[in-house]
């Protein structure tokens, strides 16, 4: 997979995922079209902050790309609707899932911020095998600090809709809680969160913290000890999401690592620079960069409101300011 290839518009990967094994991503809304503007978002500030649910792309075109990716690439563990924004803002999500299920037996997962689980959105999601909703806060004040939602989105409506969704959904629901130091990790917030979680019928509660460069430099990760403490408050169903498993780590290293390092030895780049130069989807790249950061091969630096990556090979490493 070293040579350049035609860049897909909607499909990326398969990428190694901490939770999903090998995940083939499906991106069905334009870049940063989202009802939230989370402080920890790895994709930068939300540029199209909206609650409008509409048809964002030609479904047939996306399905064609998916069919080719499945035919030519390794078989993924999941086909995952996620990507550059909030997938439930695409009105045809349900039809897309049905079409994917006719095409392949690979299970379908959807990642959602759960900001608008209204009946039509719930109907779309009921078609999936696995839904991973986020719930980072249970009080309006903390919700607004961490997720910066569209005006009018109330956390009590999110919780109520999530309860209804989980009551009727036949598949698996894994609730994700992203903890940001000093914002939603207080004992008071976590205690209220634990009480709310008692009333929601999810299969798993997964805790994670900021591991990729966030759009706000002040969005900081919790220490392992603080994560463990949060887990204790949130109860037995809670688990901490760790790094990639061995098999997945191996698969990811087969891909682009050398190409990325070669590029970053020449100059620091933003994630968009690397994606454009290599013909790789931003989200696919984010996974590789996270692993490479974890392995001490690259580092990220914030400069002029942009996040740059550079190689940590000190023979070639240049000062960031020489380039920007
Ligand atoms: S919901 Fe997801 S895509 Fe939207 S701002 Fe938050 S992290 Fe980014």
Image (cartoon, rainbow, N blue to C red):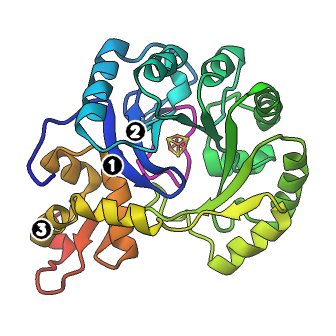
Q: Decide: few, some or many residues near mark 1? Use Cα within 10 Å; few <14, some 14-19, many ≥20.
A: many
Reading the chain from its start, which is encountered first: label 3 or label 1?
Answer: 3
Secondary element at image label 3: helix
For the point 41% across and 64% down, which residue is it? 247
Is residue 37 covered in magenta?
A: yes
For the point 32% across and 30% down, which residue is it? 10
Which quadrant of the rendered structure holds the C terminus? bottom left
Residue 219 appears at what percent x and percent y? 55, 62
Q: Is residue 55 left or right of residue 69?
A: right
Is residue 117 covered in magenta?
A: no
Q: Is residue 236 left or right of residue 217?
A: right
For the point 33% across and 49% down, which residue is it? 284
Circle 2 residue: 25
Distance between the Cα atoms at labels 2 and 1?
8 Å
Residue 299 appears at what percent x and percent y? 32, 73
Residue 203 appears at what percent x and percent y? 75, 46
Residue 284 - label: 1
Tags 3 and 1 in contact by the CB under 8 Å rule?
Answer: no
Mark 3 or 2, which is nearer the eye? 2
Circle 3 residue: 262
Q: Decide: few, some or many residues near mark 2? Use Cα within 10 Å; few <14, some 14-19, many ≥20.
A: many
Closer-to-camera residue (104/163): 104
Residue 305 seen = no
Tags 2 and 1 in contact by the CB under 8 Å rule?
Answer: yes
For the point 90% across and 42% down, which residue is it? 199
Reading the chain from its start, which is encountered first: label 3 or label 2?
Answer: 2
Q: Is residue 127 left or right of residue 273?
A: right
Does 255 sit above or below residue 143?
below
- Magenta range is 34-45
Is the magenta region chiefly helix, strand or loop? loop
Residue 232 seen = yes
Residue 27 - label: none
């Amino acid at each position: 997979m070293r040579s350049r290839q035609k860049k897909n518009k909607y499909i990326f990967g398969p990428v190694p995922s901490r939770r999903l094994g090998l995940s083939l991503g499906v991106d069905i809304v334009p870049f940063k079209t989202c009802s939230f503007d989370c402080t920890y978002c790895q994709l930068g500030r939300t540029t199209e902050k909206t609650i409008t649910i509409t048809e964002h792309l030609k479904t047939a075109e996306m399905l064609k790309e998916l069919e080719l990716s499945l035919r030519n690439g390794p078989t993924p563990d999941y086909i995952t609707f996620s990507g550059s924004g909030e997938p439930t803002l695409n009105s045809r999500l349900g039809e897309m899932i049905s079409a994917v299920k006719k095409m392949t037996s690979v299970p379908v997962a959807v990642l959602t911020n759960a900001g608008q689980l209204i009946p039509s959105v719930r109907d779309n999601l009921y078609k999936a095998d696995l839904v991973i909703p986020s719930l980072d806060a249970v009080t309006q004040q903390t919700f607004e600090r961490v997720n910066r939602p569209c005006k009018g989105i109330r956390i009590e409506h999110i919780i109520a809709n999530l309860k209804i969704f989980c009551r009727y959904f036949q598949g698996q629901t894994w609730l994700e809680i992203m903890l940001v130091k000093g914002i939603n990790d207080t004992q008071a917030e976590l205690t209220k969160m634990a009480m709310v979680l008692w009333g929601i019928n999810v299969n798993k509660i997964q805790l994670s913290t900021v591991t990729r460069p966030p759009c706000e430099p002040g969005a900081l990760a919790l220490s392992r000890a603080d994560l463990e403490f949060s887990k204790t408050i949130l109860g037995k169903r809670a688990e901490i999401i760790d790094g990639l498993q061995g098999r997945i780590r191996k698969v990811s290293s087969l891909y682009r690592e050398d190409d990325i390092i070669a590029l970053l030895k020449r100059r620091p780049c933003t994630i968009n620079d690397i994606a454009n130069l290599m013909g790789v989807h931003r989200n696919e790249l984010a996974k590789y960069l996270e692993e490479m950061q974890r392995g001490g091969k690259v580092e990220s630096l914030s400069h002029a409101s942009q996040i740059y990556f550079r190689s940590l090979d000190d023979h070639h490493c240049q000062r960031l300011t020489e380039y920007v």
